[in-house]
Image (cartoon, rainbow, N blue to C red):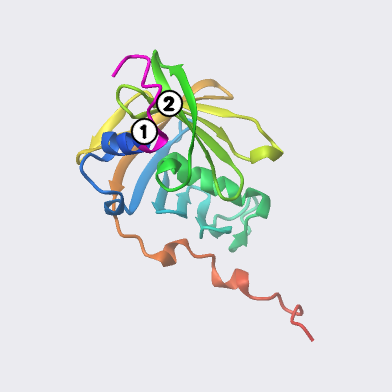
């Protein structure tokens, strides 16, 4: 293939080649979940994140545990506040539920589970890359840049809030690791408050068979508050 990429290649071919570059001979149905420990902003305690395809997410962060059931997000557990007062489960404001779809899409490319639009070819990291745009179900969107030589994702442009706030956050994938034959990013580089930073991925595991209960909104959040029962 020419260094400038194939002008006539289809998005279906790009997605298929990207799958093979990342997962080798595994079939789409063979990869059901991924677990990643993420270290960012110089922290020594990771966020332990689990994705169960296509839309379940759990983040065991230092401040508590967040869950997303494909529609809603909540704190399942929380650390005490600044004054030491205990805090129970709490629904996340609906405006932020879409952010959890982005969290999933950062850990597992969304074009493997959602419709994508091929938006052309653009140079990234010295090579021509195919641009695949994915609008996530709740409104956020991501553009992935897939290297025309390796067919690995090397850059992402993320819009967390969709058209309501079309600011784009760029992160670069510079290296990948071999996880039992799967090529997976070792993290990504982004511009933070302190300038150029890197989020590192460690202890990546696939198909850990997480139970659906791990991603459920706590039952007490679905119960009507005292005194709120209909007459």
Residue at image point 61% right, 69% down: 221
Where, quadrant-wise, is the C terminus in this rendering?
A: bottom right
Q: Is residue 57 magenta?
A: no
Question: Residue 196 at what x, y percent from top left?
Answer: 50, 20
Residue 45 visible, this angle = no
The residue at the far front in this view is: 8
Badge 2 or badge 1: first in the primary sequence? 1
The one of 214 and 103 positioned closer to us in this rendering: 103
Task: Please report the bounds of the magenta region as a residue range.
Answer: 1-12
Question: Residue 152 at what x, y percent from top left?
Answer: 34, 29
Q: Is residue 11 magenta?
A: yes
Does dot 1 land on a helix, a strand or a loop? helix
The one of 149 and 227 positioned closer to us in this rendering: 149
Q: Left or right? Give the position of 175 relative to 178.
A: right
Q: CA distance from mark 2 to mark 1?
A: 8 Å
Residue at image point 45% right, 35% down: 43
**Circle 1 residue:** 14
Relative to 165, say whether 113 is above or below: below
Question: Residue 80 at what x, y percent from top left?
Answer: 58, 55
Residue at image point 49% right, 44% down: 103
Q: Which mark is residue 130?
A: 2
Does dot 2 land on a helix, a strand or a loop? strand
Asked if marks 2 and 1 touch (Cβ < 8 Å), the reply is yes
Question: Residue 74 at what x, y percent from top left?
Answer: 57, 58
CA neighbours of label 1 inside 10 A, class few (<14), some (14 to 19), many (20+) = some
Q: Left or right? Give the position of 197 relative to 23.
A: right
Main secondary structure found in the magenta portion: loop
Q: Left or right? Give the position of 10 relative to 87.
A: left
Where, quadrant-wise, is the N terminus in this rendering?
A: top left
CA neighbours of label 2 inside 10 A, class few (<14), some (14 to 19), many (20+) = many
Residue 227 visible, this angle = yes
Label tally: 2
């Amino acid at each position: 293939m020419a260094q400038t990429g194939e002008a006539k290649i289809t998005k279906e071919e790009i997605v298929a080649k990207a799958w093979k570059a990342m997962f080798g001979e595994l079939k789409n149905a063979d990869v059901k979940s991924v677990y990643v420990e993420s270290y960012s902003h110089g922290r020594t305690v990771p966020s332990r994140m689990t994705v169960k395809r296509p839309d379940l997410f759990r983040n065991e962060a230092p401040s508590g545990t967040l869950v997303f059931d494909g529609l809603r997000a909540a704190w399942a557990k929380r650390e005490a506040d600044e004054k030491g007062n205990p805090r129970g489960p709490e629904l996340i404001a609906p405006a932020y539920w879409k952010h959890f779809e982005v969290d999933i899409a950062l850990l597992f490319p969304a074009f493997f589970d959602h419709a994508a639009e091929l938006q052309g070819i653009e140079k990234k990291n010295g090579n021509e890359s195919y641009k695949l745009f994915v609008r996530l179900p709740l409104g956020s969107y991501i553009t992935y840049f897939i290297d025309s030589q390796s067919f690995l994702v090397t850059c992402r442009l993320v819009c967390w809030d969709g058209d309501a706030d079309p600011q784009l956050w760029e992160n670069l994938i510079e290296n990948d690791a071999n996880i039992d034959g799967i090529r997976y990013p070792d993290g990504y580089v982004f511009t933070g408050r302190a300038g150029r930073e890197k989020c590192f991925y460690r202890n990546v595991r696939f198909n850990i068979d997480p139970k659906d209960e791990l991603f459920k909104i706590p039952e007490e959040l679905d119960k009507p508050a005292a005194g709120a029962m209909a007459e």
